Image (cartoon, rainbow, N blue to C red):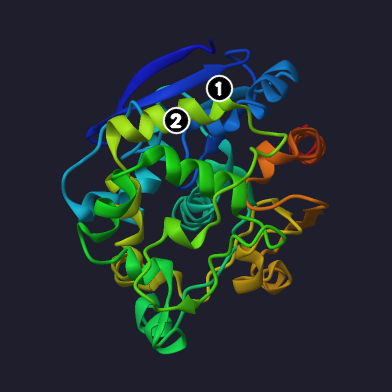
Amino acid sequence: MPNQRTVAVNGVELNVIDEGPKDGPLVILAHGFPELAYSWRHQIPALAGAGYRVLAPDQRGYGRSSRPEHIADYDIEHLSADLIGLIDDVGAQKAVLVGHDWGSMAVWQTTLLHPERVRGVCGMSVPFSPRGPVPPTQIWRQVFAGKFFYILYFQEPGVAEAELDADAAKVMRRLLSGTRTDRGGSIEANADDGRGFADRFAEPENLPDWLSQEELDFYSAEFARTGFGGGINWYRNFDRNWELTPQLDGATIDVPSLFIGGKLDPVLLMAPPDNQAQWLTDFRGNVLIEDAGHWVQQEKANEVNAALLSWLRDITNDDTTDNARDNAGEN
């Protein structure tokens, strides 16, 4: 088992995997929905073995971490403050932030809100999106009028929880097996035919080769214990997040950035990664991995680890060069 500890931060307690040399460059891994720090089980040893100190929290609402009661406790100010609090907890000035799915949105926004604390940022599966002209749900209600869209389905408190909490094992089995454009699992618009969320994903005949029964059981047991409500509350803050951040209109990400995604990820049909480059002033590119769907860091761990480590080495080299230049200027 990896080293785990509880960190009291920003009014909650986060269960955090903490691996790698204590004096190594800090990398924080932020998971998405419905996931856990466990989602990074293939990245943590690779990064720690390369000399990085890795922190991977069960984010608020998930796993062994606190699950605050109020929806507003899951807005972007809280999510960003959690990540900054982890940096503070280990006495670091900056960290590289890596996120997947909702974790991507959290790390992109944390970089905008706290640029002085971020050394570099990598999003997986969800590209960077600039602040829109109106609240997001207003746009989605127009675009998906008369159709099912999962984020809008998640907005009414209690509805999605009743469906998903009823059978956590089914939810995790279907989502982890089927969120690929070649498997029939899609989170695009669908007919509003009375089905909920998980029933729009087919029941798999077999688990994918990257997911063992033991791994699926771990997810299923955790979500059966906690329910899905904490994670769903993140979705209920899209409009609140928009209202809280007028200062980010037109803002750019100015630290070294990277995007990693699976070529078969249905999210990229809604949010093409080619659209983000104009907002990323030090963008190191898109890494789109063959035969990978939404759970890219689990499906293609070796490819993701190689891309991450190459990018991290570039950032480290940049910092070394900048420090040498600064020191030379002082002499």
Up/down of 245 relative to 136, above or below: above
Residue type at mark 2?
Answer: Pro
Q: Secondary structure at mark 1?
A: helix
Q: Amino acid at mark 1?
A: Glu
**Can residue 90 be seen here?**
no
Measure the C-alpha gap from mark 2 to mark 1: 21 Å
Disc 2 crowd rating (10 Å Cα; few below 14, some 14-19, many 20+) is many
Query: Which is more toward the observer, 186 or 329?
Result: 186
Quadrant (top left, top right, bottom left, bottom right) of the C terminus: top right
329 left or right of 205 in image: right
The numbered disc on residue 214 is 1
In the rendered image of this protein, does residue 228 appear above or below residue 19?
A: below
Which residue is at 40% across, 79% downward?
192
- Residue at image location 76% in from the left, 59% down from the top: 263
Residue 243 appears anywhere in the view: yes
Q: In this figure, which residue is indicated by the disc labeled 2?
A: 57
Q: Do the numbered discs 2 and 1 sit on residues whose CB atoms are within 8 Å?
A: no
